[in-house]
Image (cartoon, rainbow, N blue to C red):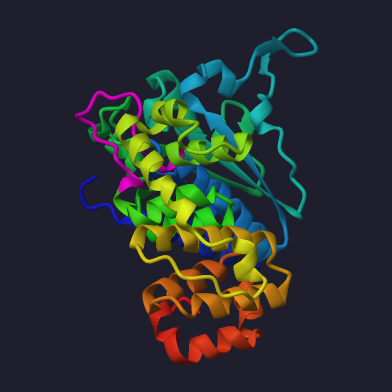
Amino acid sequence: MGLLPSMSVGSAMDSLAAVYHAAVMKGTAFRTLPSVMLWGAPGVGKSQGVRQLAKDLEEKTGKRVVVTDVRLLLFNPIDLRGIPTANEDKTLAVWLKPQIFRMDEGDDVINILFLDELSAAPPSVQAAAYQITLDRVVGEHKLPENCIVIAAGNRVTDRSVAYKMPKALANRLLHLEVEVNFESWKTWATKNGIHYKVVGFLSFRSDYLMKFDPSNDDLAFATPRAWEMVSALLHCTGQSPEELYPLIAGMVGTGMALELRTWDRVYRELPKLEDIFDGKTPPLPKTPEALYALTAAMTDYARAHRHEISRIANSISYADRMTPDFSALVMRDYMYLERDYKQVLMGIPAFVRWYQTKGRLLNGHI
């Protein structure tokens, strides 16, 4: 992507959220800001990032944020411009407004029009989409003043379906190349309830989060999107990675599914989470893979019991017995159990004691 800035999905969305929040606070019209083009490999998390941006804007502005997700690869030009029909006196052609333009224009609403797969759309569809991103109109139809426009697409080098963007058009957009960053993904995963076995496994093998290789013809490969699908399958069925091995292999590939199945067996070594949160002191696991599994399981359990402060305090005391790097991993994950949970933790004496001796390990996370 040449000299484009490369950012994690989380960092990119944080930067955009800050810009749009400032625009709302200052009364700056969204149409005066450039439309955004997100570039990245398939499955890197562009769509999830836009949904996270919507949540962040809701929290920052107090407005309702509505995302209109348009998969341009599935559209025809008429889907964007609308269907032609005659006016009342049959003298002129008018265009019926497409569904995607039916947006709430209220002052308490922010709309995000997300034009996904822009670079993969046929040139005729791209032409209509470019008019939206550049002029906020298509044909006779205008976007409302409270609408943000964000587009996304794969890079030509990804060997996915992609057309090269004309330079004259490219020069009128704000371009960001998004890349995989495990810590950024884990923060998102913790906030969004990704299955603890997926989080634990990838904490142990963070290099497995993204295995997209444009030179490889495999249909199933590991990406953040594929791991999100694995998480949904585990949540839905309640079954183990061993029981779901064939289905998981169909999402992330046989090699990755086999490693997840093998790694999952470490959970048999873990102490009971109820004992940890009830204040008992079961022995700590000894192997790194078991400790990664335990920290992910504790975070998942803590999310479900985050308002039971005494039990959270017990788990913090237990984590304090771990080596400093693993105890810091637990504390860092706990901070993202919900919005402003950092302040809740600062009110727990066990956390304050831990922070006074090991807080430097959080590296500015609090």
Q: Residue 156's quadrant in the figure?
A: top left
Q: Which residue is at a point 58% across and 58% down the rendered structure image? A: 300
Residue 51's place in the image compared with 124, above or below, is below
Furthest residue toward top: 90
Asked if residue 349 is among those painted magenta in the image, a careful observer would answer: no
Where residue 332 appears, as percent x and y from the top left, is: 49, 71
Where residue 29 appears, as percent x and y from the top left, is: 60, 56
Q: Which residue is at a point 76% across and 54% down the rendered structure image? A: 107
Q: Which residues are magenta?
A: 208-225
Residue 157's place in the image compared with 307, above or below, is above
Seen in the image, is 285 located left or right of residue 141? left
Q: Residue 81's quadrant in the figure?
A: top right
User: Which residue occupies the foreground of this view, 218 or 238?
Assistant: 238
Where residue 27 appears, as percent x and y from the top left, is: 65, 64
Q: Quadrant of the N terminus?
A: top left
User: Which residue occupies the foreground of this view, 251 or 5?
Assistant: 251
Q: Which residue is at a point 51% across and 86% down the rendered structure image? A: 354
Q: Residue 304's quadrant in the figure?
A: bottom right
Residue 268's place in the image compared with 61, above or below, is above
Furthest residue toward right: 88
User: Which residue occupies the foreground of this view, 4 or 309?
Assistant: 309
